[in-house]
Image (cartoon, rainbow, N blue to C red):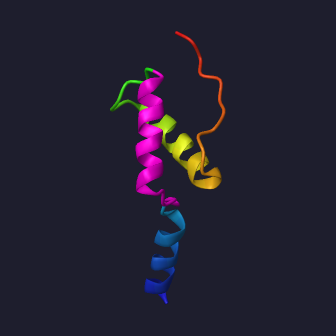
């Protein structure tokens, strides 16, 4: 009984990972780089995540207003 509870607790605490297609990630990385977001930064990872999710949902790049520097 303890082992089952431990497995259930570990499963509940595991973050949910959403699969993204390779094409969506490539498109998202290019879009973020084109907007001047530096690779290997937290901002870049978040940008890629959001753009890839939107691309997978809709099949096109999201229409966003990119902040100007």
- Name the residue located 49 percent from the left edge and 71 percent from the top edge: 11
Q: Nearer the viewer, residue 8 or 15?
A: 15
Q: Residue 41: x and y, percent?
A: 38, 30
The secondary structure making up most of the magenta span is helix
Q: Residue 31: x and y, percent?
A: 48, 32
Furthest-left residue in this view:
40
Is residue 20 in sight in this rendering? yes
Furthest-top residue in this view:
69
- Name the residue located 59 percent from the left edge and 17 percent from the top edge: 67
Region of the chain picked out in magenta, as a range: 15-35
Q: Number of labelled discs?
A: 0
Q: Residue 48: x and y, percent?
A: 47, 39
- Name the residue located 52 percent from the left edge and 9 percent from the top edge: 69
Using the image, determine if residue 25 lies above or below residue 65.
Answer: below
Is residue 43 in sight in this rendering? no
- Name the residue located 52 percent from the left edge and 77 percent from the top edge: 8
Q: Left or right of 64: which side holds 13?
A: left
Q: Residue 58: x and y, percent?
A: 65, 51
Q: Nearer the viewer, residue 41 or 10?
A: 41
Using the image, determine if residue 5 lies above or below residue 69.
Answer: below
């Amino acid at each position: 009984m303890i082992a089952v509870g431990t497995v259930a607790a570990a499963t509940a605490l595991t973050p949910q990972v959403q699969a993204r297609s390779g094409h969506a990630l490539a498109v998202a990385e290019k879009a973020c780089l084109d907007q001047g977001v530096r690779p290997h930064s937290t901002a870049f990872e978040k940008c890629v995540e959001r753009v890839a999710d939107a691309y997978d949902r809709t099949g096109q790049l999201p229409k966003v207003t990119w902040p100007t520097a």
